[in-house]
Image (tube, rainbow, N blue to C red):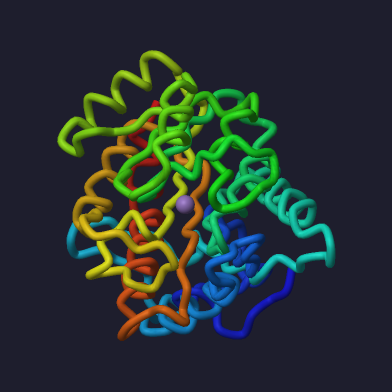
Amino acid sequence: MELVKKTFGRFPASGKSGNPRIMIVGIHWAGKNFRSSGQKDAPDYLRDYSQRYFFDRVDPFDAGTGAKISRERVADMGNIRLRSGKPSAAITDEIKKIIGNDAVPLIMGGDHSISYPVLRSYEKFKRIILINFDAHLDYKEEDEIRGDTVMYNISKLDNVACILNIGTRGVVAEKHFKLAKRNRKIKILARLENIDKTLAELAKKIRPDGVYISLDIDALDPSIAPGTAYAEPGGLTYGQVKMIMESIAKKFKMIGMDVVEVNPALDFGNLTAGSAVRVMMDFIFMESKYEKSRH
Ligand SMILES: [Mn+2]
């Protein structure tokens, strides 16, 4: 790991606090994305923006939900040192260590391809539900791990029982969409108001031992997240994502999250950074708020 001077939200850097539950990690990797490679700059861009919080001095409190956490609960581990040629192995190794300590990784990508080496680290979980907030299904049936093939490849992992897509709306080749629908692990949430019912059905059917959230920032509406390579109108509002996050936290053990595809070079007035950082905070709040009420 490479420690950073400016930590996310000014939370303690790794090693300086006792036994953090949430470990923030940056992965500055933009894989084989042909549209742009700016996603690799996102981790430190989001950290810069998050300096407006002062969690080195005050405990985070969300006036919207009443959630409060101790700042000792979170640590910023810095960025994963990517070995040249083998970034994917380095990612899997580092995330495995975090999971091995019973901590929850909160990851800043990077392009969407990073979710594959991350999910591969979750060996100790056997029936994961992956909630994929994304305008696209990222489902091309090709073995090379890229942003547009990542969910196909994750669907082949034994420990991932289901991928629930939320925010799907991009203009794509119908062929890939049809192939995705044929895969019994892939689900698409058609109507947001059905979220609680859908989660309840999945809980019953799969009995997951953990839920992992992947947030491709293009799931959000471009009016609040323009800084991404494949922005599509008609996306989720911040409030919708927050509501869904709370629904997930009430029901399931949250085992990790990534926020991917933020491209600082395409951002406008820090809007994308503001949305991404706030959703990350909500993950921290919700994971903590419902920790004791589950199971
Ligand atoms: Mn994606």
Residue placed most toward the observer, 82 or 134:
134
Q: Nearer the viewer, residue 214 or 181?
A: 181
Q: Residue at x 69, y 33 (%)?
A: 123
Rendered image quadrant of residue 15 = bottom right
Quadrant holding the N terminus: bottom right
Above or below, 13 relative to 221: below
Can residue 57 be spotted in the picture?
no
Of 9 and 71, nearer the camera is: 9
30 up-or-down from 44: above or below: above
Marker count (numbered): 0
Q: Percent from the top left, x then y, of residue 26?
A: 60, 67
| Residue most extreme to the top | 205
Task: Report the side of 97 relative to 290 (left or right).
Answer: right
Up-down relation of residue 123 to residue 74 (above or below): above
* Residue at 42% across, 28% down: 178
Q: Position of residue 278 (x, y in %)?
A: 33, 66
Residue ID at (30%, 77%): 271
x, y percentage for residue 289?
33, 48
x and y percentages locating residue 250 in the rendered image: 30, 36
189 relative to 141 in the view: left or right: left
Q: For residue 137, which quarter of the picture? A: top left
Looking at the image, residue 207 lies above or below residue 119 = above
- Report the residue at 64% width, 80% height from top: 4
Q: Look at the image and tell me whether residue 270 can be seen.
A: yes
